[in-house]
């Protein structure tokens, strides 16, 4: 005599003395009279069953194989079902319970496969599983078992029907995908076109507003620019007038400076003329006059000497008439000689005057020769690699012209100017 206990995953069944029907205690304890009462245990664990149904012809005659997974257990919460399970399986091993439940589920699974097409089983697995669950549960309840869950695990065939079905479905899905993609692109293109149209409308509207603003700005700017240009033109005109006046005043002052320079040059030239006149008078005129005076006096003395000699000779010959005639002849001869000497003196003086005049004119000739150069704004010199280049070349050209002056004077007047200058210089020394 004692108490017996069990866990929540099993139930105790007591039968015998004091019990008109078995006492079932799921997950608890009970008092048992040994020898008078019998104690048995039944498992309440959930059993997982793999249900294979190979090569079953479906509704349209297509052979397929199906594998399902089911969880089955004894219902310990319902005493009637527990009693039924005890009546069916008490004292039997778990393997036998598994086999009975598996065969029952396989039969219902096979029957359901024969009532449906492959497409229905393939496409709607949930419907198939629910159908098998409902049919199998109604039969297993009568055994005290409940189907906790049933799931279709696998569908296969040996003829490639499912593969072809999958390919067709894949093609259909791809077709639908392409159609959907095309429609999406079409819708996107339509929406994009609408958006682009709205964008272009907004852009054109903005461009119009910008153009109007730009036009207003350009008009105002043109008015401002016209006013500014007018003021600037007036200022430039005033500046030009003032600049012209200033240039005119500068030119007048330059002309005055040139007039003053010219006046000073004239004064310098006049003083140079006076100096040359004095130098000529001192070096040429005075010596010439002295020479003329000397020759005149010599001529007079010679004439007096001749007259005295003639008188003496007349007295010596004592012929008064002849003496007078001889005196007259001698006087005439003396006067002729005096005139010749005076002519020679005046001739020498005339050559010296010509030399002085030429020397005085030569600076003016040089200035006239160089005058065209003063009017040139730009002179371009081309050299062959021989001779002088630059200002010395221009100066040399002017000097060459001046050097030709004595020959020109000699050709025009017959006076050898070079010889006379040398003779005059030697006489002064």
Image (tube, rainbow, N blue to C red):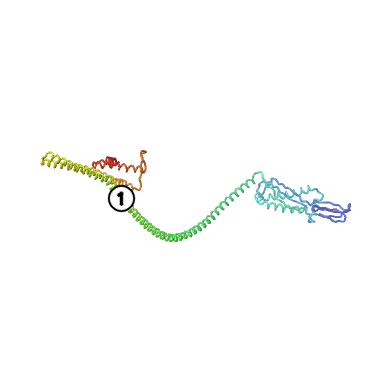
Residue 66 horizontal/vertical position (percent)? 69, 47
Residue 60 horizontal/vertical position (percent)? 65, 48
Counting every numbered tag in the picture gives 1
The answer to whether residue 386 is above or below residue 13 is: above
Q: Which of the two residues, 372 or 409, is positioned nearer the viewer here?
A: 409
User: Where, by quadrant of the figure, is residue 359 drawn?
Assistant: top left
Residue 141 is left or right of residue 30, and the answer is left
Q: Which of the two residues, 390 or 297, is positioned nearer the viewer here?
A: 297
Residue 343 horizontal/vertical position (percent)? 20, 43
Residue 271 is left or right of residue 307, and the answer is right
Q: Residues within 10 Å of mark 1 (few under 14, many from 20)?
A: few
User: Where, by quadrant of the figure, is residue 236 drawn?
Assistant: bottom left
At mark 1, the secondary structure is helix
Q: Which of the two residues, 106 or 210, is positioned nearer the viewer here?
A: 210
User: Where, by quadrant of the figure, is residue 331 drawn?
Assistant: top left
Residue 46 horizontal/vertical position (percent)? 76, 51
Residue 429 is left or right of residue 337, and the answer is right
Placement of the C terminus among the 4 image quadrants: top left
Residue 299 is left or right of residue 19, and the answer is left
The residue beneath circle 1 is 271
């Amino acid at each position: 005599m004692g108490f017996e206990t069990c866990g929540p995953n099993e139930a105790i069944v007591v039968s015998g003395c004091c019990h008109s029907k078995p006492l079932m205690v799921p997950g608890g304890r009970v008092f048992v009279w040994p020898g008078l009462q019998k104690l048995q245990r039944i498992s309440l664990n959930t059993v997982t069953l793999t249900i294979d149904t190979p090569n079953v012809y479906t509704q349209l005659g297509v052979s397929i194989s199906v594998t399902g997974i089911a969880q089955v257990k004894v219902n310990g919460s319902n005493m009637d079902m527990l009693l039924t399970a005890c009546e069916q399986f008490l004292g039997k091993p778990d393997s036998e319970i598994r086999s009975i439940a598996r065969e029952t589920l396989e039969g219902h699974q096979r029957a359901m496969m024969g009532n449906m097409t492959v497409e229905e089983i393939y496409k709607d697995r949930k419907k198939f599983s629910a159908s098998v669950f409902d049919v199998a549960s109604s039969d297993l309840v009568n055994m005290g078992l409940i189907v906790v869950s049933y799931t279709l695990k696998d569908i296969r065939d040996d003829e490639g029907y499912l593969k072809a079905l999958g390919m067709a479905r894949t093609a259909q899905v791809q077709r639908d995908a392409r159609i959907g993609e095309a429609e999406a692109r079409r819708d996107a293109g339509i929406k994009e076109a609408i958006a682009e149209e709205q964008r272009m409308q907004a852009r054109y509207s903005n461009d119009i507003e910008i153009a109007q603003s730009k036009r207003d700005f350009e008009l105002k700017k043109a008015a401002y620019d016209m006013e500014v240009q007018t003021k600037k033109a007036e200022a430039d005109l005033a500046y030009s007038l003032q600049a012209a006046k200033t240039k005119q005043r500068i030119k007048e002052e330059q002309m005055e400076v040139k007039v003053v320079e010219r006046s000073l040059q004239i004064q310098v030239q006049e003083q140079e003329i006076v100096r040359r006149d004095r130098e000529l008078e001192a070096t040429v005129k005075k010596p010439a006059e002295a020479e003329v005076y000397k020759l005149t006096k010599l001529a007079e003395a010679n004439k007096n000497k001749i007259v005295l000699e003639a008188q003496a000779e007349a007295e010596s010959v004592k012929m008064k008439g002849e003496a007078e005639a001889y005196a007259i002849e001698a006087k005439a001869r003396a006067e002729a000689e005096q005139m010749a000497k005076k002519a020679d003196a005046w001739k020498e003086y005339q050559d010296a005057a010509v030399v002085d005049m030429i020397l005085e004119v030569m600076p003016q000739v040089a200035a006239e020769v160089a005058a065209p150069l003063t009017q040139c704004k730009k002179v371009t010199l081309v050299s062959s690699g021989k001779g002088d280049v630059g200002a010395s070349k221009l100066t040399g050209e002017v000097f060459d012209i001046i050097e030709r002056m004595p020959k020109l004077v000699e050709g025009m007047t017959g006076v050898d100017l070079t010889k006379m200058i040398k003779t005059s210089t030697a006489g002064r020394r």
